[in-house]
Each structure stands twice: as C-alpha cells, then as structure tokens.
Amino acid sequence: MTKLPSYAEQRDQMDAHAATFGKKARVGDVFPTLELTAISGQLVTVPDSAGDVVHLQLRRFAGCPICNLHLRSIVARHDEIRSRGIHEVVVFHSTAAELAKHEAELPFPLIADPERELYERLGVERRVSSLLRLRALRAAFAGEAAVFGKRSTKRGALGPVRPTGGRLGLPADFLIAADGRITAVKYGRHAYDQWTVDELLDHARSASAPRTDPNGVRAVSPARP
C-alpha cells in the first residue's frame, strides 16, 4: 500500500506562504493555500478550489469520546451543512492508521497530523485545564456511552490509554472563504468548547452578507464573540 505523506512532509509548502502561523489567527487574516492529503488519499485544498467555504476543525485524537460526541452532531446535519456551501475538513493529531478505524463513520476528509504541525502554526494549544471543566467531563462520558453503550463503564471515558499527541489538546474552528480570508474563528477554552452546527451556520450566513462601513467600503462581517 502506498504510504501517504505525513503532514510534516508538507511543511515546506506551508512555509512558502506568508501566513500568521505560530500565533492565533484572527478574522480577516489570509489563510495560505494548502494541499493536504486525507487518509483516504484524497487531495484536499484549503481554501477550497471549487469555491466553497471551508470549515477547518482541529480536533484532538482518534477515538477521543469528546470529539466523537461533537462529530456525531456534524454528521447528523452534514447534508444541511453542505447545502450551505460549507466543506468540512477535520484534522486530528493522530496517525493515519489510528484514524482509519473511524473513517467509515465520517463523510468528510480526515487529515492526520501526528506531529501537530498545523496546530503549532495556528496557535492551537494544549492545556491541563482542557479536561477540568464539568462540560468537558460530561461530554467525555456521553461520547463514550454513545459509541460503546454499557461497555463504557468498564472502559472508562478517557478513550485510548496513550493517544498520539496526548489528551490535553484544545479544539479550534476556522471558517475560510474561497478567497482565503478567515471569516470566523474560535479557539476552544476546554476540550468540548467548539461551534455547534447552528453557530457554524450563523457564521457562514454572516460571512456571506458583507456590510458597508461609514465610508462606503465593503467590510468583512465580524465573527460573533
């Protein structure tokens, strides 16, 4: 089987672009043009070469019960998301082999970034406090129960014992227009702090309705706090 290129092997392309990597991105920043290889072998371009808006999610590790719970909500409304011209791209700090176990359940490209290259360039952090919120702990148990049912009481709600990249990662969401502008961004404060589907659709709706500033110049609609 052909070995898929790792994210680290694509770093030269990323470094060739002027970008705001290494610090937190902001609304209005221009995202570099990237060609990423999904674990399926599909070539994924960000921004989207077909003109769609890209919702780039940086999640935690393969098998993370918190991520599982959130992505189930994305899968349940994926047709609606696509009908709004939004293309989902989801990154995990896991290996392609680890992600392959979950690929059949998710109808969008999965990117393996076990060395956390993209996380570091976009300022997505790891914190001990990522799991020390009641909402995150509840999501961990709910996510585990949704997948494993009663077996979750034996297996625990922490997913793999030693996940690639650790279990202290925080999530992040980026909405990227076809011209590369970041129109909305969210850096999670704990492991279950991300956009809901409704929030994603609201951000996409706001981004597609440009406003005019007092000087008559078109301006990007700001993201909601």
Image: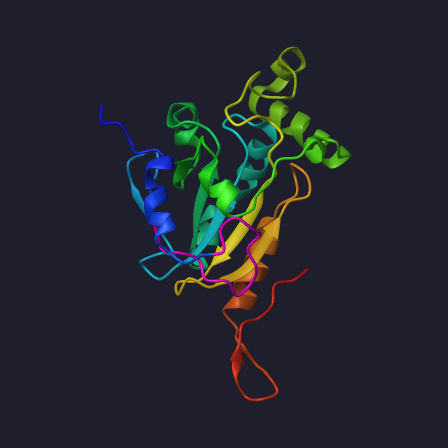
Residue with the most extreme bottom position: 215
Q: Position of residue 164 (x, y in %)?
A: 50, 24
> Nearest the camera: 160 or 119?
119
205 shown above or below 92? below
Instruction: Give how far across and how far down residue 62 sits, in percent.
Output: 49, 27
Main secondary-structure element of the magenta-colored stretch:
loop
115 or 142: nearer the viewer: 115
Residue 65, picture quadrant? top right
Q: In this rendering, would 147 be left or right of 56?
A: right
Q: Please name whichever residue, 134 or 107, is drawn nearer the observer in this view of the structure.
A: 134
Left or right of 84: which side holds 12? left
Q: In this view of the protein, which residue sits in the foreground, 124 or 141?
A: 124
Q: Position of residue 112 (x, y in %)?
A: 41, 34
Drawn side of residue 26 relative to residue 11, left or right: right
Question: Is 30 placed above or below 59 here?
Answer: below
Residue at position x 45%, y 32% in the image: 115
Q: Residue at x 68, y 34 (%)?
A: 130
Point out the stretch of residues depicted in magenta: 20-35
Residue 98 sits inside the magenta stretch: no
Quarter of the view holding residue 219: bottom right
Q: Residue furthest right?
A: 134
> Does residue 28 show up magenta in the picture?
yes
Q: Residue 191 appears at what percent x and percent y?
A: 65, 36
What residue lies at 61% left-to-right and 55% top-to-bottom? 199
At horizontal 57% and vertical 71% (from top left) the residue drawn is: 221
| Image quadrant containing the C terminus | bottom right
Q: Quadrant of the N terminus?
A: top left
